[in-house]
Image (cartoon, rainbow, N blue to C red):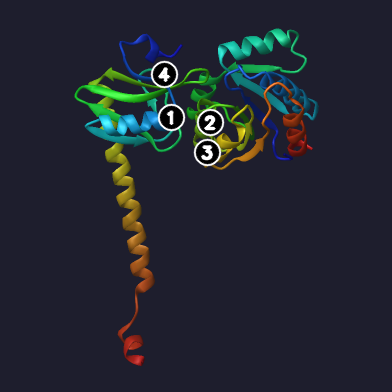
């Protein structure tokens, strides 16, 4: 994590509750350690985030996930590391895309009911952070703490 | 909203896995091309996908995958001779690069294999 000065957090579909909690937590941790953090997500995910953190205490920069992909492909932006949150096949597809288009060190944050089989499907270069968490964010938070310590 | 959603498209499969979408395109197209994730089509859609990302051609229609984080993968078809031509051109360029790479490898190998007759008759 030492070489990660610019970090991207990509949110998947916000239907699994632990995601928002852990994204706010991780963004705050990374910001506090002096890193430049951007959180990307769908319109719905970003609205949830902005309502929860209305004054931007935990998340300073946000962007639409598809615009983020476009800007990386067009080499307008890049990041040193990327945390791709996923609990479904679509989330995995976004993470695989990030792995292909960006040189960022990729962390695949895998959670939800199907965390383990989903983790087995990750066959691109990524450090996996896996917890079968749906409502309780603590197991996922603990695993993230070990990575960013 | 990307430009693709505002165009006249046909939806062949919806809310499936990316692998299922790829299988459908491979089986239902007259021509299949593989592109890298991030390949741009139309004005502003960058293909999201797990490599190999298949794109198909069926008559005048281009078949491709469209991924939405909350809804999974869709297989869409849009008539576009322009995009099909670009897909074919992209494939040609890819083949040229591969052939060039192969030729360079062969050249390197033949350089490594160079051996003098004196060496052969030494034994």
Q: Quadrant of the N terminus of chain A?
A: top right
**Residue at the extreme left:** B59
- Check residue A121 in the rendering and tell me which mark sits there, or answer none: 3
The answer to whether tags 1 and 2 share a subunit is no
Q: Are marks 4 and 2 in contact (CB under 8 Å)?
A: no
- Check residue B2 in the rendering and tell me which mark sits there, or answer none: none
Judging from the image, mark 4 belongs to the subunit labelled: B
How far across and how far down the image is residue A97, in percent?
50, 32
Local crowd size for mark 2, using a 10 Å CA cut-off: few (<14), some (14–19), many (≥20): many
Q: Can you say whether A127 is above or below B16 in the image?
A: below
**Residue at the extreme front:** A113
* Residue linked to disc 2: A92
Judging from the image, mark 2 belongs to the subunit labelled: A
Q: CA distance from mark 1 to mark 3?
A: 12 Å
Q: Nearer the viewer, residue B90 or B118?
A: B90
Q: Are marks 1 and 2 in contact (CB under 8 Å)?
A: yes
* Residue linked to disc 1: B18
The label nearer to you, 4 versus 3, is 3
Q: Secondary structure at mark 1?
A: helix
């Amino acid at each position: 994590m030492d070489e990660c000065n610019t970090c991207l957090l990509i949110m998947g579909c916000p239907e699994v509750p632990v995601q928002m909690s852990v994204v706010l937590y991780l963004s705050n941790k990374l910001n506090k350690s002096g890193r430049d953090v951007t959180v990307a997500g769908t319109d719905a995910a970003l609205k949830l985030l902005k309502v929860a953190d209305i004054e931007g205490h935990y998340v300073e920069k946000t962007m639409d996930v598809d615009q983020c992909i476009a800007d990386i492909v067009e080499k307008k932006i890049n990041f040193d590391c990327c945390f791709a949150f996923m609990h479904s096949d679509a989330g995995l597809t976004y993470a695989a895309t990030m792995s292909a288009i960006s040189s960022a060190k990729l962390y695949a944050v895998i959670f939800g009911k199907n965390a383990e089989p989903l983790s087995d499907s990750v066959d691109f270069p990524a450090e996996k952070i896996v917890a079968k968490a749906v409502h309780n964010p603590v197991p996922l938070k603990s695993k993230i703490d070990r990575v960013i310590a | 909203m990307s430009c693709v959603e505002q165009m006249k498209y046909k939806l062949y499969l919806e809310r499936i896995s990316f692998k299922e979408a790829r299988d459908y395109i491979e089986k239902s197209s007259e021509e299949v091309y593989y592109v890298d994730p991030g390949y741009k089509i139309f004005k502003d859609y960058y293909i999201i996908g797990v490599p190999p990302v298949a794109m198909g051609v069926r008559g005048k229609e281009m078949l491709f995958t469209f991924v939405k984080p909350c809804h999974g993968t869709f297989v869409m078809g849009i008539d576009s001779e322009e995009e099909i031509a670009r897909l074919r051109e992209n494939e040609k360029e890819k083949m040229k690069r591969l052939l060039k790479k192969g030729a360079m490898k062969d050249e390197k190998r033949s350089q490594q294999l160079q051996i003098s007759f004196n060496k052969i008759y030494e034994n």
